[in-house]
Image (cartoon, rainbow, N blue to C red):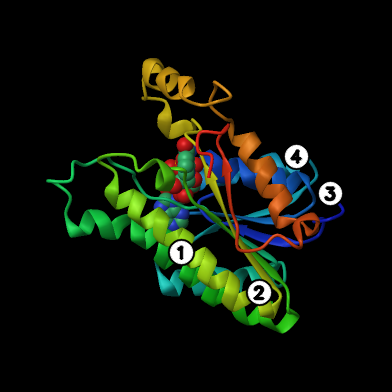
Amino acid sequence: MNNNINGKIAIITGASRGLGAAITKRLGNDGVKVVVNYHSDHQSANKVVKAIESANGQAIACKADVTSPSQVKEMVQYVQDTLGSVDIVVNNATGPQPTISVECQTWDDHLNPLHFFVKAPLLMLQAVLPQMRERASGVILNIGSEVVELGVPKFGHYVAAKAAMLGLTRSWANELGPMGIRVNLIAPGFIPVERHETVGKAEKADYAKSVPLRRQGTPDELANAVAFLVSDEARFIHGQKFAVNGGMTLL
Ligand SMILES: NC(=O)c1ccc[n+]([C@@H]2O[C@H](COP(=O)([O-])OP(=O)(O)OC[C@H]3O[C@@H](n4cnc5c(N)ncnc54)[C@H](OP(=O)(O)O)[C@@H]3O)[C@@H](O)[C@H]2O)c1
């Protein structure tokens, strides 16, 4: 339990697995009433809910495509009716992340990540903004990526969309700060989750070798940083980008 956050209401998008699930479990353990948003994997979302409940936390699963204006509105309305006004939004959901050489990248390849990292956060913000404005309080945390600094090749579509998310974070910080709404971005390094099970050991070891701390991070380590940033302990931290990557980027 964390008194700086206990009792708040948070929506974590894409929380059925991976980093979103770890973030949600951590916030649930801190006493946050968490909404486990997911798109298709009902079973995994329910497992996250059960894990939080079995540790005496409060969680609900909520299916919604975060790129759909009507589904985002319905989800936020459902949360308000079921739990109350939303205090915290963590924009974490992502679609597939293929690498594609620049000669082969289509405009649709660029639009896909933009839907997740620009459109979805905008829809989420617009849906919760009336509640946050009314209470002059709220926290938005965007999950970015270190690839913006690294400029990873064959990944321009994803890198550009994550860079756009950082731009949104900064613009929103200036626009929403005066309303009492804090906005920040966390940029994780390569942190293995379920979808990386097929990535070879050698590739992971190569990455780890280039990290100053000489290892990859864990979803729990990322979740620790999220728990701090969305809590009242971080109440004067605003408009910032935080790398959680063992020093892989030093900006
Ligand atoms: N893991 C890393 O190494 C790493 C590094 C840097 C940045 N990041 C960022 O961290 C975030 C989480 O990454 P991850 O690796 O944990 O991803 P992941 O394991 O692939 O999980 C993606 C999540 O997004 C959900 N999702 C997919 N489409 C959705 C939609 N249309 N609406 C709502 N939810 C949807 C999935 O739900 P379903 O299961 O229901 O489909 C799943 O819960 C992403 O923003 C990613 O870019 C990750």
Disc 4 marks a residue whose amino acid type is Ser
Residue count near mark 4 (Cα–Cα under 10 Å), binned few <14, some 14–19, many ≥20:
few
Taking 158 as reference, is 130 left or right?
Answer: right
Residue at 59 percent across and 70 percent down: it is 173
Residue 16 in sight from this viewpoint: no
Q: Which residue is mark 2?
A: 177
Give the mark nearer the N terminus: 1 vs 3: 3
Residues at marks 2 and 4, CA–CA distance in whole angstroms: 37 Å
Pick out the residue farthest to the left.
103
Residue 167: % across, % down: 46, 64
Disc 3 marks a residue whose amino acid type is Asn
Q: 235 and 32: which one is in front?
A: 235
Residues at marks 2 and 3, CA–CA distance in whole angstroms: 24 Å
Q: Is residue 84 above or below residue 35?
A: below
Residues at marks 1 and 3, CA–CA distance in whole angstroms: 31 Å
Residue 4: % across, % down: 83, 55
Q: Which residue is mark 3?
A: 2
Disc 1 marks a residue whose amino acid type is Gly
